Amino acid sequence: MMDNESKIIKELHDAFQHGILDRWYPLTVDKECGGFFTNISCNWNIMPLQEKMIVSQARHVWTLSKTSEFLGGSEEFDQNAFHGFKYLTQKMWDSTHGGFYQIRSREGNVTDVKGWRDEKRAYGNAFALYGLAALFGHTQNPDALEWAKKTFHWIENRAHDDRNKGYFQFLSPESVPFDRKSAYKTVAFDSNELGFKDQNSSIHLLEAYTELYHVWKDDLLRARLLELLELIRDIMVADQGYLQLFFENDWKPVSFRHASDAERKTNFGLDHISFGHDYETAFLMLEASHALGVQNDVRTLTIARKMMDHALLRGWDPVSGGFYDGGYYDKNGAFSIVLDTKNWWAQAEGLNALLLFSKIFPEDKRYAAHFLKQWEYIKTSIIDPVNGDWFEGGIDKEPQFRSGQKSHMWKCTYHTSRALMNCIALLREDEYSEINAVAEHWRKTAESMH
C-alpha cells in the first residue's frame, strides 16, 4: 500500500479522462473521409496535411475498445471504434494481395509520404491485428473476429520465416518479403532496416497475438505466440538484460561495437539500448506467458525482472527522474548514455512496468518508489498543463515540445491510455481486470522462487 494512494488514483484518472479522452475524442474522428485525423497541432487544430498510417489508425481502434470496456461500456467510444474498423477494412486492406497497407492518403488512396506507397510491414499488420482482436474482445462482433483471423493467417502465410523462425518485416505491394537482393526496390524512409529481423515488430506481434489468444484459442496461434516469447526472451535479450535491436536471418545480432565512431553513430538506429522497449517488452512477455497458461514460468519472470532492473540501473535519471532514450556498451564493455532525451511513450511504459513489478515483488520497495518518482516526473515534464495530453518528450530535455504536435502518425493515445488504465486498475486492485490477474499470477510465481 502506498501513501496517498487515493490521491494518485484521482490524479491518474483526471490525466486519463480530462487530459486524454476528452481532448482526443471525438475531435480526431474524421467523419468526412473515415478513420482518424493524424496531424494535430499543439493547441488541437486539425492541420492541413493528413495521411493515415495503419499503426496509429489501429491504435485508436484498440484504445477506444479497451477504454469503453474499462469504463463499463460507452456507446460513443464503441461507435468510434467501429468507425475506425470500417476505414481499416475498406481503405487500408489490400483486396488483391491481402495485408494492410502501411500508409494511405486521408481519403484512402496511395500517398508518397515516407515512401511506403503500397508496401506492407509486419509491424503495421501486427497493430491492425491488435486493434481487431481488442474490438472483438469488447464487443463480440463476429466481423471483427473474422478480420482478426484473416490478418493472422496473412501474417503467417506471407511473413513467417519457416526456416529460421520469426517474421520478415518488409513486404512488397504483392505481399512478398523482400530484402536488398530482391528485384523489388523500395524508396521508403526505413530502408536502412531492410533485410533484418527486428525486436520491434517481434514484440508487437507478441503483443497482438496475446490479445488475439485471449479470444481465440487456436493451435497455430498458440504455437506462434510461444515461439515469439522464446525468441524474444532467449535470443533477443542480451546477457546484461537489454534487447538487441536487429538481427540477420539466422539471428546473429547486428552490431557496430567494433566499427569506427562515425560508422557507429551513423547506424545508431540499428544498434543501441532502448530502455523504453526493454521494460515494455518485460511487461509484454509476462502478459504473453500468462495468456498461454504457462505454469511456474520462472525463466520468463527472471528475464523480465532483469530487463526492468537493467533499465533502472543504466537508464534512469537520478536527478530529475524519468528514463533516458538511449544507451550503449562500447567494445570494451564501458557503458554511456548516448541519448539523454525522454520520449513520452517510454515514460508511459515505465510508469506501467514499475507499478506492475511493485505488485509482483512487494518486498522490493525500489519499484514502488520509482513509480512515484516517475509519476512526479510525468506531471512535471511530460503532461501539458495548458492544453492537456502529453508533450512528445520531457521538456526538461526538449523544451521545444511545448509547441510540438499533439498527434502525428507515431503519436496517439495507445501508450498513454494503456499505462493509465493499467495503473488505475492496479492501484484500485480491480478484481476482474486482466492486469490484476497478470500481477497476481506472477506474484505467486515470485513467492514460489523463494
Image (spheres, rainbow, N blue to C red):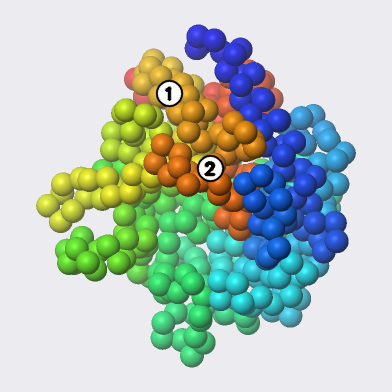
As rendered, which of 178 and 394 lies closer to the eye? Answer: 394
Q: Which residue is mark 1?
A: 373
* Distance (Cα) linking label 2 and label 1: 22 Å
Q: Secondary structure at mark 2?
A: helix
Residue 342 versus residue 85 in the image, above or below:
above
Q: From the top left corner, tell me how far across and down residue 147 is, in percent.
A: 76, 60
- Identify the residue at horizontal 54%, vertical 10% (top origin): 4
Q: Is residue 363 visible?
A: yes
Is residue 110 rendered to the left or right of residue 225? right
Q: From the top left corner, tell me how far across and down residue 55 is, in percent.
A: 62, 58
Q: From the top left corner, tell me how far across and down residue 397 is, in percent.
A: 39, 41
Query: Tag on residue 402?
Result: 2
What amino acid type should be assigned to the residue bearing mark 1? Lys
- Identify the residue at horizontal 85%, vertical 40% (top origin): 76
Looking at the rendering, which quadrant does residue 24 occupy?
top right
| Of pointers 2 and 1, the one earlier in the residue sequence | 1
Query: Tag on residue 122?
Result: none
Q: Secondary structure at mark 1?
A: helix
As rendered, which of 244 and 55 lies closer to the eye? Answer: 55
Q: From the top left corner, tell me how far across and down residue 273 is, in percent.
A: 33, 50
Q: Is residue 144 visible?
A: no
Is residue 403 rendered to the left or right of residue 85? left
What amino acid type should be assigned to the residue bearing mark 2? Arg
Query: Which mark's residue is nearer the viewer, 2 or 1?
Result: 2
As rendered, which of 113 and 248 lies closer to the eye? Answer: 113
Pick out the residue farthest to the bottom.
Answer: 183
Quadrant of the snapshot with the C terminus = top left
